[in-house]
Image (tube, rainbow, N blue to C red):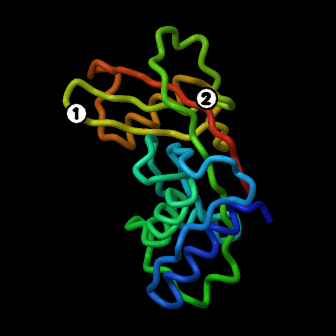
Amino acid sequence: MDYYVKLAKKSVEAYIKEGKEIKAPLKPDSGDKNLQAGVFVTIYKGKDLRGCVGTYLPTQKNIAEEIVHNARSAAQDSRFPPMKIEELSKLSYEVSILSEPKPVTDKSKLDPKRDGIIVFSDFGRSGLLLPDLEGVETVEQQIAIACQKGGIDWPNDKLEIFSFQVEKHK
């Protein structure tokens, strides 16, 4: 199991079993204790989504702390019932480390398999969609789903779109 995935799993298990937050150990030989990035932690139970929470910009001192924080938050994802100890052995984890978001000037250059997107409306609403999601084949689908998640009336609202790539760890 990948180091970052182990860290997410350890964070969730400590929180669910003991109500504790673990200390975020740095990846051995990472070379940079101050490396920061946005991180999403996705939790699955079988093939079903069980939680997904993240940040598109860093909020913690380093990636390890970002993973620990977001894994705990994903375990408490309000879209799902509270997580139980009995479920822990059935869970799998995915950690997505995001590149810095860049403004999109040409939608035709986006690839929903490679690029995640963040949409912002004039009214302060936003929605994010990670790349390479099952069933999302076109940029238009990707934008529509991100807008729906953010409560944005697309195509009526004016949008600003940013793209990012992810380094996935499973």
Q: CA distance from mark 2 to mark 1?
A: 22 Å
Say which residue label 2 marks: 115
Say which residue label 1 marks: 124
Residue 88, numbered circle: none
**The N terminus lies in quadrant:** bottom right
Give neighbour class at mark 2: few <14, some 14-19, many 20+ (Cα, 10 Å): many
Residue 95 point in image, percent of width and height = 63, 55
* 61 to the left or right of 166: left
| Mark closer to the chain start, 2 or 1 | 2
Q: Quadrant of residue 77?
A: bottom left
Q: Residue furthest right?
A: 1
- Residue depicted at 28% across the width and 27% down the height: 121
Residue 167 point in image, percent of width and height = 68, 42
Q: Amino acid at mark 2?
A: Asp
Residue 107 point in image, percent of width and height = 52, 14
Q: Residue furthest left?
A: 123
Near-viewer residue (152 or 99) = 99
Residue 75, relative to residue 15: is it above or below?
above
- Residue depicted at 57% across the width and 89% down the height: 85
* 4 to the left or right of 38: right
Q: Mark 2 and 1 residues: CB-CB less than 8 Å, in contact?
A: no
* 12 to the left or right of 56: right
Q: Secondary structure at mark 1?
A: loop
Residue 103 point in image, percent of width and height = 45, 18
Q: Amino acid at mark 1?
A: Gly
Q: Secondary structure at mark 2?
A: loop
Residue 6, relative to residue 160: is it above or below?
below
- Residue depicted at 44% across the width and 36% down the height: 146
**The C terminus lies in quadrant:** bottom right
